[in-house]
Image (tube, helix red, strand yellow):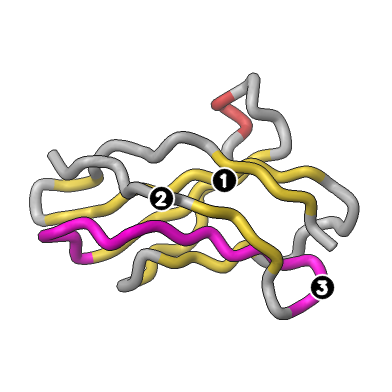
Amino acid sequence: MLPAPEQVTLTQGTLSGSLDLRGCPVPNAGAYEGQMTTTIDNPGCCRSVDQTPAAQVTLEQLTPGTNYWGRLRAIGRAGPGVRSEPVSAIAI
């Protein structure tokens, strides 16, 4: 199983209502999956975001002024790895 990406950040995207979820690349990862929520206390409310080949996922169509939580995981040949610790930011 792949380890969780390290140094994960959630920062403002280039467009209004978007946030960029980034982490350090994980060796042997073929893709990355982001997950977001507005309710950190209820993991069942998390929404998965499309897979990307880089350790960066853009979260779009977010409500400005709302606090979002995101986490990232690497996906390898054996399947998905461990999710990162959640990070948060307010969408503008």
Q: Quadrant of the N terminus?
A: top left
Which residue lies under the disc numbered 2? 7
Measured Cα–Cα span from mark 1 to mark 2: 13 Å
Under tag 3, what secondary structure? Answer: loop
Image marks 1 and 2: residues in contact by CB distance under 8 Å: no
Say which amino acid is labelled 2: Gln
Residue 2, position as x, y percentages in the image: 17, 44
How many residues crowd mark 2 within 10 Å: few (<14), some (14–19), many (20+)? few
Sequence-wise, the earlier of marks 1 and 2 is: 2
Question: In what element is the residue under mark 2?
Answer: loop
**Residue sitting at the far front:** 7
Q: Nearer the viewer, mark 2 or mark 3?
A: 2
Image coords of residue 26 (percent x, y): 22, 56
- 31 vs 48, left or right, is left
Q: Between marks 2 and 3, how big is the CA–CA gap?
A: 24 Å
Tell me the residue at 77%/59% (across/down).
62
